Amino acid sequence: MQEPQPVAPLPAAQMAFSVPAACKVAGVGRTKLYEAIQSGALRARKNGAKNLILRDDLQQWLESLPTEKVIIPSTKRP
């Protein structure tokens, strides 16, 4: 009988995202993300030609977005 193999630890939470990954995680489009970077609202770092967005910077930017009351249309028919 074989001894059980040790379970590898789960990888740590991702610290930085590429622009496509940041868009996917944040649920926003590339244009909005690049606009936020250009305006200075979202900080991006460069690694060669690649833009990297730190998790904390992305979180802060998302939390800085204005809140709005969501109106859900009624599904009842007259």
Image (tube, helix red, strand yellow):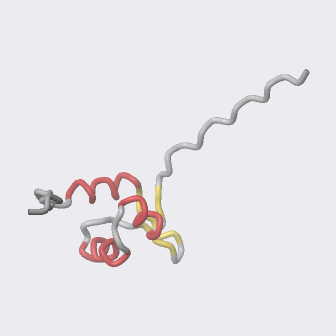
Q: Residue at x 41, y 63 (%)?
A: 53
Marks counted in the figure total 0
* Residue 69 on image: x %, y %: 11, 57
Q: Quadrant of residue 28?
A: bottom left
Relative side of 6 to 70, left or right = right
Relative side of 58 to 1, left or right = left
Residue located farthest toward the front when viewing the structure as drawn: 78
Rendered view: 27 above or below 13: below
Front residue of 66 and 42? 66
Front residue of 1 and 53? 1
Front residue of 33 and 47? 33
Quadrant (top left/top right/bottom left/bottom right) for the C terminus: bottom left
Q: Residue at x 47, y 61 (%)?
A: 17
Residue located farthest toward the left when viewing the structure as drawn: 78
* Residue 21 on image: x %, y %: 47, 64
Q: Residue at x 24, y 67 (%)?
A: 41
Q: Residue at x 52, y 77 (%)?
A: 49
Quadrant (top left/top right/bottom left/bottom right) for the N terminus: top right
* Residue 62 on image: x %, y %: 27, 58
Rendered view: 50 above or below 64: below
Residue located farthest toward the right when viewing the structure as drawn: 1
Q: Quadrant of residue 72?
A: bottom left
Relative side of 47 to 30, left or right = right
